[in-house]
Image (tube, rainbow, N blue to C red):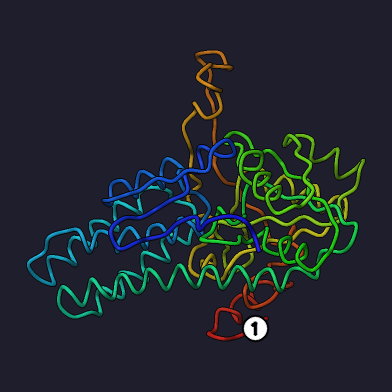
């Protein structure tokens, strides 16, 4: 398998997170003992990646249920609702967090008295984390057949093990193909401004023994047109029922290049990333601090007095997407009909 720890875990007393801000120079951990620390870890991108954020939020609620003093069921439920609101305010675009919070809160609301509620909240949080690992391995099994000997694969940002509880989404087919003995290389976009591709995806793939070529984001068109790319796989932070994908900024641009040059463009995500209710205009794109763009290593590289736009995500239309790799199989077009079908419990595309 892969030589990486779980991105997020809970030992009953604290939430333990890989500190992704320090990669690749240092593989270290942050320990959170309260809900405020968990929320800050999500907002400050100690942990990032939609599935990892979802599991972190779930464990945060489990932690809060155990640490907060409550004399009765109603008081504990009120505290959990307050904690859920704190978590929901951290990052607005990734769907898995809202999905995970809703699952844990349903478990809390259907439980008995205080100790039963604490037990059921923790059980549900652990179930969410284990389901994520199982889904990622299944995504790898379904997607590995897309990767052939000699392929040049491209990806953006980090939809790897460190974006999930373990094993990754977009990287899962790569890891499975590698274990099957397929020889291929991966072109990784650096992913400005936070450099998740350069710092994290390259780090992961190198540890897995997969050949990596790191490129600046603006070189994607050159590589696709002049060198040639056989396959593009990205992750997703939210997928609507019509197949619209919200993912890291630059994904839409990459999909346009893929469509222009006839390169298959796949999105890998668990069904927990599917948002069946929202419309395109309902989804709020997170805008992050201008200093992420303007300041590097403590030094400002942009002039003062200019406006800096720093959207964290963009929207890729379904017509630019070849297929969506899920734990239940690969969804092809027409997406809307098949996403509704795959949303049925146990259904396959």
Regarding residue 282, the answer to whether it shows in the image is: no
Name the residue at 28% across, 47% down: 36
Name the residue at 63% across, 35% down: 192
| Residue 67: percent from left, percent from top | 20, 58
Regarding residue 219, the answer to whether it shows in the image is: yes
Is 40 above or below relative to 208?
A: above
* Image quarter (top left, top right, bottom left or bottom right) of the C terminus: bottom right
Is 131 above or below relative to 5?
A: below
User: How many neighbours does mark 1 have within 10 angstroms: few (below 14), some (14-19), or many (20 or more)?
Assistant: some
Name the residue at 34% across, 61% down: 11
Q: How many marks?
A: 1
| Residue 229: percent from left, percent from top | 86, 50
Name the residue at 66% across, 54% down: 316
In the picture, measured across the screen, residue 56 lies left or right of residue 314, that is: left
SS at mark 1?
Answer: loop
Residue tagged 1: 348
Is 186 above or below relative to 51?
A: above
| Residue 70: percent from left, percent from top | 11, 64
């Amino acid at each position: 398998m892969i030589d990486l720890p779980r991105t997020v875990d809970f030992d009953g007393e604290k939430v333990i997170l890989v500190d992704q801000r320090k990669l690749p120079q240092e593989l270290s951990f942050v320990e959170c003992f309260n809900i405020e620390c968990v929320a800050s870890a999500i907002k400050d991108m100690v942990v990032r990646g939609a599935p990892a954020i979802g599991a972190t939020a779930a464990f945060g609620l489990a932690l809060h249920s155990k640490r907060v003093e409550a004399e009765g069921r109603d008081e504990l439920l009120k505290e959990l609702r307050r904690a859920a609101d704190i978590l929901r305010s951290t990052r607005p675009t990734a769907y898995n967090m809202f999905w995970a919070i809703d699952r844990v809160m349903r478990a809390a609301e259907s439980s008995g008295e205080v100790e039963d509620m604490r037990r059921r909240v923790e059980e549900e949080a652990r179930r969410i984390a284990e389901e994520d690992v199982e889904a990622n391995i299944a995504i790898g099994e379904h997607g590995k057949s897309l990767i052939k000997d000699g392929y040049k694969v491209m990806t953006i940002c980090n939809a790897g093990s460190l974006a999930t509880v373990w094993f990754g989404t977009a990287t899962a087919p790569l890891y499975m193909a590698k274990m099957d003995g397929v020889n291929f290389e991966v072109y990784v976009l650096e992913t400005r401004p936070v450099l998740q591709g350069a710092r994290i995806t390259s780090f992961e793939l190198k540890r897995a023994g997969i050949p990596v070529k790191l490129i600046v984001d603006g070189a994607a068109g050159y590589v696709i047109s002049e060198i040639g790319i056989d396959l593009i796989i990205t992750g997703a932070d939210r997928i609507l029922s019509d197949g619209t994908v919200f993912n890291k900024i630059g994904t839409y641009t990459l999909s346009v290049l893929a469509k222009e040059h006839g390169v298959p463009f796949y999105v890998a995500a668990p069904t927990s990333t599917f948002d069946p209710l929202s419309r395109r205009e309902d989804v709020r794109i997170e805008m992050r601090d201008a200093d992420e763009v303007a300041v590097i290593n403590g030094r400002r590289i942009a002039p003062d007095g200019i406006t800096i736009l720093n959207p964290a995500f963009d929207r890729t239309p379904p017509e630019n997407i070849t297929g969506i790799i899920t734990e239940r199989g690969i969804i092809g077009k027409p997406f809307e009909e098949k996403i509704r079908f795959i949303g049925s419990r146990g259904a396959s595309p």
